[in-house]
Each structure stands twice: as structure tokens, then as C-alpha cells.
Amino acid sequence: LLPPLADEIEVSLFGPGYGEAVAVHLGSGDWLLVDSCLNDDRQPAALAYLKSMGIDPGQAVKLLVASHWHDDHVKGIADVFAASTSATFSCAWAMTQKEFLQIAHQYQASDNSVAGSRTTELVKIINLLEGRPPIKWTGADKVLLASSGRTPYQITSLSPSDLRAQLFLKEIAKLVPVPKETRRAAVDISPNHVASALWVSALGEDILLGSDLEEVADPNCGWSAIVSSTGRPAGKAGVFKVAHHGSLTGHNDDVWSKMLTAQPVAILTPFNKSGGLPRTADVQRILEKTPRGYATARPTSKAAVKRDKAVERMVDSVAISFQRAQPKCGHIQLRKRPGVDATWRVSLDGNACELKQLA
Amino acid sequence: VAELVQPPRLTNADLREVASTGGGDVKLNYSNLSPDLIAPPAPALPLKPLQLLQEWEGTVTEVKDESFVCDLVDITAGHSIPEEIAELPIDEISEDDRDLLRPGALFRWTIGYYEAGGVRRKTSQVQFRRLPMWRPQDLKKSEEWADKMAKFLAATGS
């Protein structure tokens, strides 16, 4: 694998069907990483990718963003941060408040499961922060990192709003353990109030990374608030990491008409849980907006691993449903040399496919 | 001296297995025993597979009216991350364990063979783990760590 050229922008999306990680080459060897998932070797996918190209994450990664704390976005993120020794860490302000940290510590300290706790990742990162660049909180229209060097770039968070952060703290209060309560593992809470959508401007190109941000009834929150904001970066993005696995709740028509170019490259990671995302209607809705849609995993890869026939028969007789959570990891790579390439070059690896194959 | 006979503690899965195989002579007959020779059912000694075929660790992620959704880690394969997702009927859980069913609860799901009355049978068992309670001192420790870190982050973050 060859690394991108200094004047070549790259957006790489990794996803095994349950998990998501993004790597963006900002130019001149500088990288942005967002979230983390594991590849087929059970290594953090973005980290392994950089290493496979001979890139030292300790030098190259300038910013690591945890867009939110859901399990499918944080697997291995502490290892990514440990290796990215010069990177600034960024997450929502609410995730660094005492209430949330207390819960994170309680669950990781008392976790008895083989799988470990998702909050363990955050606690590990917090413990690594001493001696590192100060943490950058994401929020509405907030510049997280900018460079005015030979290849200037700027990374701006578009969310969460302060109101959503307060809602998040209110929601997580429900998870606070009380004395004499039986210990348990931490679970995700929905809707996710602190997803950080990002706007990346580099080498003259704009990219919108939608995280798992969902639309809510309140026009002062979610995508509606972002679209109507006068403080967000100007321009239209040619690449869209579709929000919340392509779900209807992550969709806003105005995002497509006001924040994206006509027929942008749309990339997404499926979510192989709770009925699965994207649904057929979601795929059709996205393909009506752009024919250039790609996914990191195919739905057919949900089939469970092969086992002893007696086990398979018993599973069939007992389980209402049984499927693979993490099929083979897929990788969508987009590269473009502004001034040289007219359009984005798309490479699909592993389980990745065109979005129309999911319809 | 007569030895106390422990009646087997059959789960719903066992009963379904018996039903699906037609039962046959796998049922033990206690009717000819004196009641005082029969010990009360063991509360926490479910049937152990003699030959374990498969074992998962499960974490409950969602509880529905008649079923629950869970992440499964394949213990048999030596995995440490959830690679499968299942929806299982609540009927699979013994009455004793049902109060433990909530998001975040941990359990073991085993499939294997065991013998009863000289007959080998296949069994599926869902057993919830009765984890220790959170102690006040644990919670206090977490609160102190969180307080210290939140102050550190507030002082350095932007």
C-alpha cells in the first residue's frame, strides 16, 4: 500500500458491519482519525492501515476525535491514542464532566465481562492525557485544528449544541449505579445527544463527516440546527460520511441541498443490530440523492460462523435470531489530487461494496 | 441409610428438548419414593453439560416483552470481543434468574450433552451471573477519580 501524495487528500472509512473508523489525509502527511473499530485481525483498523503504508502514527496523526461513546465507535480507540503520541484528543465537553467520568470509571472498574467495557476505552484515554496536548472539546461551529502550512487545512466540529450536551448529562444520570445494586455492564443510550459531526476543509476540498448525529423534533438541535447555523464553514462538501448508518433519523433534506455538492460521494458503515441499518428505504433515499454511494459491509455477511452441526441445530431451535455482529471488515478509500483529478477515485477493499448492492 | 435423591432442576430448554425428542425414558420417576427422601430442588445447581460443545458470554443490550437482545462473545473459540448478536426468548431463562434480566446483565449460554437416566441428551442453558453489588467505597473511589480528572480537564481543555 502506498501512502497518499503530499498534495493528495484521502478519506478512508472502515467498518465491519458493527463499528466505524475514519482516517483523513489532510495533506503533507498530516492525518485526522475519527472513532475506532477493529479489523479482521482484531486490531484498530485505522491504526493498522496507517502502519501498513509505513506511516508512523506518532508523527502523522494530529487529531483524534471520539465522535461519541457508543460501542461501535470506540473499539480500540485507547490503543489508537496511545500510538498517536503527538495527537490532540477531542470529544464532546459533556464526556469530560464529572458525572460522565464517574460512570465511566465505575463501570470499567467493576467490569467482569470477557469483552470488557466500552467505558474502559475512555478511562484509558483520560489517564493518557497527562503530558499530551490539551483536550479539545467539540461543539457547534468550533475549530478543532487548523494549519496554515504548505497545505492548509481546518477541522471544525458542527455539534453537539450546548442544549444537547445538557440533555446527555441528564440521560446518563439514569446509569449511575447506587450502593447495593448488582453490578452490570454499561450499555449504549439512545438517542445519542453528543454526536460530533465534523467539517474538514483541506487542499481546497470540503468533507462532511456525519458521525451518528440524528435529527430530533427540536429545530435547535441535530441537523436542523447545523443547517441553519450562520457560524458553520461556508462551502459545499463533495464527500459525505452519511450520518447514523444511513437511517431516516439521521437524514435531513437540507443537508443534501445546502451543505453538499450535487451528487456527492456518499459513504456509510452498516449497523448489524436492532433490525439493521441502512434499511432498503434508506438505501433508496440516499441513491436518489447521489448514484455514488458506498458501504463498508454487505448485508449477506451477517451469516453466523459455521459450527458443529449439533450446536447449529440447537441455536436454530432456541434463538429468535442469531447473526454475526462483526462480519469481515470493509474499507472504502477515496483519494483526490485537487487540480489533477476531476473526481474522487474510489477503491473498495474487503467487504466494502457499492450502496446499490444493499438495496 | 438411604441417600437423598436430588430431583433434576429442568429448565424450559430441557423440557422443550424432552418434548422434541418425545421424552422416552429420559424422565426420572420419583413417584415411588417416599416424600421425605426427596430433597428440595437445589436452588443454584443447574444441570451441567457433561460434554460442552459451545459456550458464549452474553451481555443483554435490550429487553423486550417476551425476548431479549444480546451481544455474544464466543468463549469456546477464545474470543474476547462480541462477534455475534442474538435475540433469545425470555422463556430460556429460569424463573430464579429473571429478576437479573436488564440491559447490561451478563450471562453464560452453553450448549452441550448431559446424561440423565443413562440417556444422553442435548441441552441449552442460559445462566445469568450474580455479580457482586456495588459497594459504597467503590462508588466513592470512582467519584474521587472523576472529580480529580474533571478538574484537570477543565483546567487544560478548550
Image (cartoon, rainbow, N blue to C red):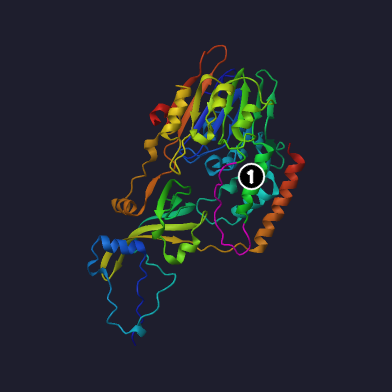
Badge 1 crowding class, 10 Å Cα cut-off, few under 14, some 14 to 19, many 20 or more, is many
Residue most toward the bottom?
B1
Choose between A68 and A60: the one closer to the eye. Answer: A68
Does the magenta run of residues contain A303? no
> Which residue, given by chain and number where applicable, does mark 1 sit on?
A168
Task: Please name the residue shown 72% across and 47% down the image.
Answer: B150
Is residue A124 toward the left or the right of residue B39 in the image?
Answer: right
Choose between A355 and A112: the one closer to the eye. Answer: A355
Q: Name which quarter of the figure residue A136 lies in.
A: top right
Task: Please name the residue shown 55% across and 39% down the image.
Answer: A73
Callout 1: residue from which chain? Answer: A
x then y, percent, for residue B94: 41, 64
- Image height of A176 relative to A225, above or below: below
Q: Name which quarter of the figure residue A237 lies in.
A: top right
Residue most toward the top?
A339
Q: Amino acid at mark 1?
A: Phe
Is residue A271 toward the left or the right of residue A231 in the image?
Answer: left
x then y, percent, for residue A283: 44, 30
Instruction: Tell me which segment is drawn in magenta.
Output: A177-192
Choose between A8 and A229: the one closer to the eye. Answer: A229
Taking the image as drawn, is residue A60 in sight?
no
Q: How many marks?
A: 1
Quarter of the image for the C terminus of chain A: give it.
top left
Choose between B115 and A354: the one closer to the eye. Answer: A354
Q: Name which quarter of the figure residue B121 lies in.
A: bottom left
Taking the image as drawn, is residue A7 in sight?
yes
Task: Please name the residue shown 66% across and 63% down the image.
Answer: B136
Residue most toward the right?
B155
- Image height of B127 relative to B8, above or below: above
x then y, percent, for residue A243: 54, 33
Magenta part mainly helix, strand or loop?
Answer: loop
x then y, percent, for residue B105: 51, 57
